[in-house]
């Protein structure tokens, strides 16, 4: 093999290994839901929170933010800043419902989802359910569907690591979309104001300023030793962030219940030989997915959609774990024999394996205990008491 073609291939392989991460963040989430459901609130300064002496703002609308109202602020202070502020009590069940809706959308693209709060999540779409090469296309699609299905806007950031995806989602808010390409990451970080760095709250930003650090370029000039001396463990993160390094995986607390694949044909099929070939290909793809996910299930389900969009499913459960072609192919054929497609051409074929080995339910981590937006349930948050970030919802 020629060296140049080898290098080309190596470069492509490295690019393929590169992760594709999207951070999705709903805009002014609680306030947006309230404004959506009560048009009287549209265009007005709204804060969601308890209207009392000890009340705290959980989300402020953009109209209120212009007055300096922000989340985690006392309601009394917020009212002083913005005398016309309308305080609305929170409807948390409703927010949870919308959250479930957006998670359903996410799951159409990937199951590797790490929620940061009700309205924010990382998605690893390096390999995804829609076989889309470009993460930005997925981000566009997710934003469009969120708007269609919830009438709310979301902002999305796309990059190769969590840090940059998170910063990017905040970069063009509201209704924003920002992509930080690996080749441009260092330039992007260099000009990034230090306040915009993940985990840099107001107090940390002030300390950075006192050290003469106002942007990523300046941060990059300091040694790891210096930064850990000043910021403890977070110093390592800041050192890496400045260099565009963040290998932390998207950690999902979702437990897989099945694995499957399906195909819609360009032309409906009804000849037995065609159906057998397509079934065979579907089995091969299913096997690939089983291997990739290491899923262990006992039930094979065949799904058939006909030309008139009616649909049937047929299942078989066996004792053994379904992982081999020698087991799955005969079962798939057996299920197919029960389907009468002579008069009904087939539009779609699907196969899945489910009924997982019973495992002890894992406790869900990363679950959000607080309703306050911008809360980051990360280990890193605990390393230094002043690493609090108000966060923009
Ligand atoms: Mg938000």
Image: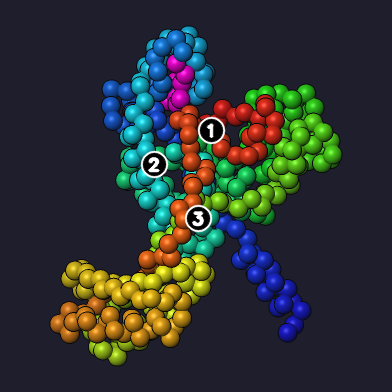
- Considering only vertical position in the picture, is 251 above or below 380? below
Image check: 115 left or right of 225?
A: left
Mark 2 lies on residue: 99
Q: What's the distance in space between the residues labelled 1 and 3, CA to CA?
A: 21 Å
> Residue visible at 34% across and 82% down?
331
Q: Measured from the top left, where is residue 217 in percent x and y?
A: 76, 39
- The outermost residue toward the bottom is 273
Residue drawn at 35 percent across, 20 percent down: 88
Q: In which quarter of the image is residue 358?
A: bottom left
In the image shown, does 232 or 122 lie closer to the viewer?
232
Residue 94 rendering spot, x and y as whole percentages? 32, 34
**Mark 1, residue position:** 375
- Residue farthest along the left direction in this orientation: 343
175 w.r.t. 353: above or below: above
Q: In this view, does 354 lie to the left or right of 80?
A: left
Q: Does the residue labelled 1 lie within 8 Å of ligand 1?
A: no
Residue that numbered label 3 is attached to: 112
Give the quadrant of residue 26. Answer: top left
**Distance (Cα) linking label 3 and label 2:** 16 Å
Residue 234 position by quadrant: top right
Ligand 1 closer than 8 Å to label 2 CB? no
Residue bounds of the magenta highlight: 55-67
Please tell me which residue is depicted at 62% across the width and 44% down the height of the picture. 163
Would you say 355 lies left or right of 380 here?
A: left
Q: Distance between the residues labelled 1 and 2?
A: 15 Å
**Judging from the image, what secondary structure is the residue with disc 2 in?**
helix
Badge 3 or badge 2: first in the primary sequence: 2
Determine crowd level at label 1: few under 14, some 14-19, many 20+ residues with C-alpha closer than 10 A: many
Q: How crowded is mark 2: few (under 14 residues within 10 Å), some or many (20 or more)?
A: many
Q: Earlier in the sequence, mark 1 or mark 2?
A: 2
Can residue 122 be seen here? yes
Above or below 110: residue 44: above
């Amino acid at each position: 093999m020629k060296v140049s073609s080898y290098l080309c291939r190596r470069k492509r392989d490295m690019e393929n290994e590169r992760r594709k991460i999207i951070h999705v963040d709903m805009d002014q989430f609680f306030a947006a839901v309230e404004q959506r459901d009560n048009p009287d609130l549209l265009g007005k300064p709204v804060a969601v929170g308890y209207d009392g002496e000890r009340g705290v703002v959980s989300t402020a609308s953009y109209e209120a933010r212009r007055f300096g109202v922000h989340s985690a602020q006392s309601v009394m202070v917020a009212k002083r800043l913005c005398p016309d502020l309308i305080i609305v009590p929170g409807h948390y069940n409703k927010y949870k419902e919308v959250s479930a809706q957006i998670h359903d959308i996410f799951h159409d693209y990937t199951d590797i989802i790490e929620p940061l709060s009700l309205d924010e999540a990382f998605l690893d779409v390096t390999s995804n359910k829609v076989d889309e090469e470009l993460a930005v296309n997925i981000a566009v699609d997710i934003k469009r569907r969120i708007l269609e299905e919830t009438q709310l806007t979301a902002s999305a950031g796309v990059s190769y690591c969590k840090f940059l995806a998170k910063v990017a989602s905040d970069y063009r808010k509201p209704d924003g979309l920002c992509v930080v390409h690996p080749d441009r990451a260092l330039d992007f970080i260099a000009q990034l104001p230090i306040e915009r760095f993940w985990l840099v709250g107001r107090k940390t930003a002030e300390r950075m300023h006192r050290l003469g650090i106002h942007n990523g370029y300046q941060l990059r000039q300091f040694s790891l030793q210096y930064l850990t001396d000043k910021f403890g463990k977070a110093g390592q993160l800041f050192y890496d962030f400045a260099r565009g390094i963040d290998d932390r995986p998207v950690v999902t607390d979702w437990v897989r219940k099945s694995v499957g694949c399906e195909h819609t044909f360009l032309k409906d099929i009804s000849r037995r030989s065609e159906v057998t070939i397509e079934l065979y290909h579907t089995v091969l793809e299913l096997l690939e997915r089983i291997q990739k996910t290491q899923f262990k299930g006992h039930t094979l389900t065949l799904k058939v959609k006909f030309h008139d969009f009616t649909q049937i499913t047929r299942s078989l459960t066996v004792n053994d774990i379904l992982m081999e072609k020698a087991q799955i192919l005969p079962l798939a054929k057996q299920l197919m024999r029960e389907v009468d497609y002579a008069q009904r051409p087939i539009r779609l074929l699907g196969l899945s394996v489910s009924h997982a080995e019973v495992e002890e339910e894992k406790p869900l981590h990363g679950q959000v205990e607080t309703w306050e937006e911008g809360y980051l349930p990360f280990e890193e948050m605990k390393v230094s008491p002043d690493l609090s970030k108000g966060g923009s919802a």
